[in-house]
Structure formats: structure tokens, C-alpha cells
Image: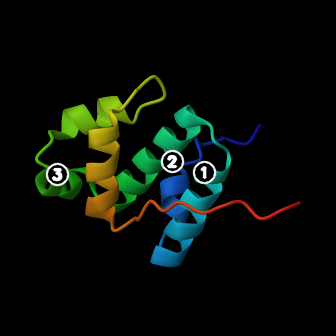
């Protein structure tokens, strides 16, 4: 008899602010817009989409749609969600290799 496999949800492993910071930092380092958007959606689900919707003034449906695999959130939406999550976006000059 085979094992029953379940879908892995990374939101289940983001139990601390430190884990969230590491997860988002690694996503940002990829420069992959789709992956960064997906990662932000995962973090938002961790904190609770209803709470994020209330803090941003956006609907839960809009948030789920924006941060889905096929979503394409605006910069305004992205920054509003990051602010609600307490995630800062910063710029730095890359170190010389």
C-alpha cells in the first residue's frame, strides 16, 4: 500500500518573524518577480489574509488573486502588504565579487 502524500505549504514553517525575514530575503535575492510575489502571498497567509486585508484596505479576494501563481500585484499593493506585514524594502550597493 502506497503512502498518501500531502501538498506542502511553506506557510506552515514560518512561525517566527526571523523565519519570515529569511524567507523573504531569499525570495528577493532571486530577482524573480513571480517568486517574490508568491513568497509575499505565503507570508500574508501566515499572518492571516483577513487581517492583511483590513490593514491595507484591500479585499481578501483581491489579495489572494494578486499573490496567486498567476497574479501580478501592483507595486502599490505589494508595498501596502509589506507595510502591513512589517517587512521593509531597502536598497544596497552589491559588494564586489
Is residue 47 shown to the viewer in this render?
yes
| Mark 3 residue element | helix
Few, some or many residues within 10 Å of mark 1 (<14, 14–19, 20+): some
The quarter in which the C terminus is drawn is bottom right
Q: In the picture shown, does residue 85 fall above or below 49?
A: below
Gap between marks 2 and 1, in whole Å?
7 Å
Residue 21, relative to residue 91: is it above or below?
below
Left or right: 77 in relation to 72: left
What secondary structure is marked by label 1? helix
Please state, as top left, top right, bottom left or bottom right, where the N terminus lies in the image: top right
Q: Is residue 16 visible?
A: no
Q: Nearer the viewer, mark 2 or mark 1?
A: 1
Q: CA distance from mark 3 to mark 1?
A: 22 Å
Residue to which mark 3 is pinned: 56
Mark nearest the camera among 2 and 3 is 3
Residue positioned most to the top: 70
Q: CA distance from mark 2 to mark 3?
A: 18 Å
Residue 46 is situated, as x and y percent measured from the top left of the image, at: 39, 59
Disc with the residue nearer the chain's start (2 vs 3): 2
Where does residue 28 sit, x and y in percent of width and height? 59, 51
Residue 55's disc is: none
Residue drawn at 53 percent across, 43 percent down: 36
For residue 64, above or below residue 89: above
- Above or below, comparing residue 96 to residue 31 in the picture: below
Which residue was labeled with disc 2? 39
Q: Residues within 10 Å of mark 2 (few under 14, many from 20)?
A: many
Residue drawn 49% across the image and 40% down it: 38
Q: Which mark is residue 27?
A: 1
For label 2, the SS is: helix
Amino acid at each position: 500500500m502506497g503512502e498518501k502524500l500531502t501538498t506542502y505549504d511553506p506557510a506552515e514553517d514560518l512561525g517566527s518573524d526571523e523565519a519570515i525575514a529569511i524567507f523573504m530575503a531569499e525570495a528577493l535575492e532571486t530577482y524573480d518577480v513571480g517568486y517574490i510575489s508568491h513568497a509575499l502571498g505565503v507570508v500574508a497567509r501566515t499572518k492571516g489574509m483577513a487581517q492583511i486585508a483590513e490593514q491595507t484596505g484591500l479585499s481578501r479576494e483581491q489579495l489572494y488573486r494578486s499573490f496567486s501563481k498567476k497574479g501580478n500585484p501592483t507595486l502599490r499593493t505589494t508595498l501596502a502588504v509589506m507595510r502591513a506585514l512589517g517587512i521593509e524594502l531597502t536598497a544596497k550597493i552589491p559588494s564586489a565579487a
